[in-house]
Amino acid sequence: MPRHTGSVRHGRRVLQRRLVALPVTLVAVVLLLSAVPRTIGVLVSARSEPVLRTLQDQRPANVDDLRTLAGTLQEGRTWLGDGRLRTDLGLAYLLLAEKLPPNSSDSVEMLHRAIEALRDGLGRAPANPYAWARLAYAEALADGWTPQAVAALRLALITAPYEPRLLWSRLRMAFLAWPEMSGEDRELVFQQIRLAWRADPREPAKLAIDLERVNLVRAALLRSPQDSAAFEALLKH
């Protein structure tokens, strides 16, 4: 009996040590797992930054660089819930779609991937006018000015109505999407036309002529007889 009792006590002590060690082990595992996304984030940032910087500087990137960027960001997407990573991924796919042969299966696939990644990223971080503008453009490329494309353009205008770097690209898209827009959307476009006019009167005039939206600009400038007269003068040159 004493020998049996001793073995039981020894077994209990071993079990207690194991139970005490278990929370420590669990904490270590949790810390390890929580460190993985941070590590992945550092790696993704290091590998993607050169190409992203090229794009931010508005310099062209070749197909190989864009494929590398897309692959890196896609890997990071598995571990990171970051909305910006996904919208950057959407940009990479969108640029790939533009560089590949038009209407090829690869180009169409990249375009659909771009739309999916942009939607995913904007669902997580919606206050991104650049991503909304890219989504509007991608949706329009894929299926024309559908309600989804117009909605994306609307949010691109609402989230940053006074963003100079988006002024001309959004105005071009707005002119193209005009027939599909609601009255509220059109008021947003009138506002953009007036902003564009103050920035450089020649540009909205040229855009209106190229896209046959002269009467649209006339309507937007109607409040100012001086601007209206200046616009008419530009049309004659």
Image (cartoon, rainbow, N blue to C red):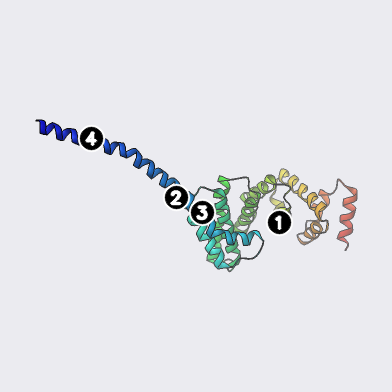
- Camera-near label (1 vs 2) is 2
Q: Quadrant of residue 159?
A: top right
The label shown at residue 42 is: 3
93 left or right of 212?
left
Using a 10 Å C-alpha cutoff, classify the residue at mark 2 as few (fewer than 14 neighbours), some (14 to 19) or many (20 or more).
few
Distance from the alpha carbon under mark 3 to that under mark 2:
10 Å
Crowd tier of the residue under label 4, counting other residues whose Cα lies within 10 Å: few below 14, some 14–19, many 20 or above = few
Instruction: Write down the residue under mark 4.
Output: 13
| Residue 66 in sight | yes
Query: Label 3 vs label 1: CA separation?
Result: 33 Å
Q: Which residue is mark 1?
A: 169
Q: Earlier in the sequence, mark 2 or mark 4?
A: 4
User: Which residue sits at x=54%, y=55%?
Assistant: 45
Q: Amino acid at mark 2?
A: Val
Q: Are marks 4 and 3 in contact (CB under 8 Å)?
A: no
What amino acid type should be assigned to the residue bearing mark 1? Ser
Tell me where residue 75 appears, x and y as whole percent. Answer: 48, 56
Along the viewing direction, whichever of 122 and 19 lies nearer the viewer? 19
Query: How far apart are the alpha carbons under marks 1 and 4?
Result: 72 Å
Instruction: Report which residue position mark 2 lands on.
Output: 36
